[in-house]
Image (cartoon, rainbow, N blue to C red):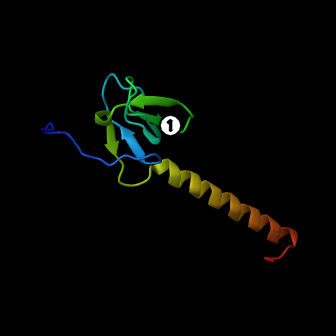
Amino acid sequence: MPENNAISIDVRVGSAVRIRRIWRSPYAGRFGVVSAIEPSDPYGSYVIEFEDGLHFRYERQDLEPVVSTSAHFYQRAFGRLCRLIRLLVRRLEVGGSWF
């Protein structure tokens, strides 16, 4: 029988997850992506990759589901959109056209 605070989540390679805030967990509270699932590994079944490139192993109880994508994704997308707009404005100022 699961504990009262247990959450059943479907985790697959490529799923976004958040690391639960546990004192023994590295990168607790941060978001990551499941890069591999190795059930027979004694150190942790789930390999999580973080945005800085580091990988850590966790067990299922250390992971929390992520309902939506982290704010970091939206910040990066917005930054790229702003760069594209600046590029288009510069081209128009130089005398170029849209085509």
Q: Residues within 10 Å of mark 1 (few under 14, many from 20)?
A: many
Residue 40: x and y in percent read 38, 29
Nearest the camera: 76 or 8?
Answer: 8
Callout 1: helix, strand or loop?
Answer: strand
Quadrant location of the N terminus?
Answer: top left
Residue 74: x and y in percent read 51, 55
Residue closest to the far right: 95
Q: Is residue 39 above or below residue 64?
A: above
Which residue is the site of mark 1? Answer: 49
Label tally? 1
Residue at (36%, 49%) from the top-left corner? 66
The part of the image, by quadrant, that contains residue 42 is top left
Residue closest to the far front: 40
Amino acid type at circle 1 is Glu
Nearest the camera: 72 or 47?
Answer: 47
Quadrant location of the C terminus?
Answer: bottom right
Residue at (39%, 43%) from the top-left corner? 17
Q: Is residue 69 above or below residue 2?
A: below
Residue at (41%, 47%) from the top-left corner? 12
Q: Is residue 2 left or right of residue 24?
A: left
Residue 54: x and y in percent read 54, 30
The part of the image, by quadrant, that contains residue 23 is top left
The part of the image, by quadrant, that contains residue 30 is top left
Residue at (50%, 31%) from the top-left corner? 55
Q: Is residue 23 left or right of residue 77?
A: left
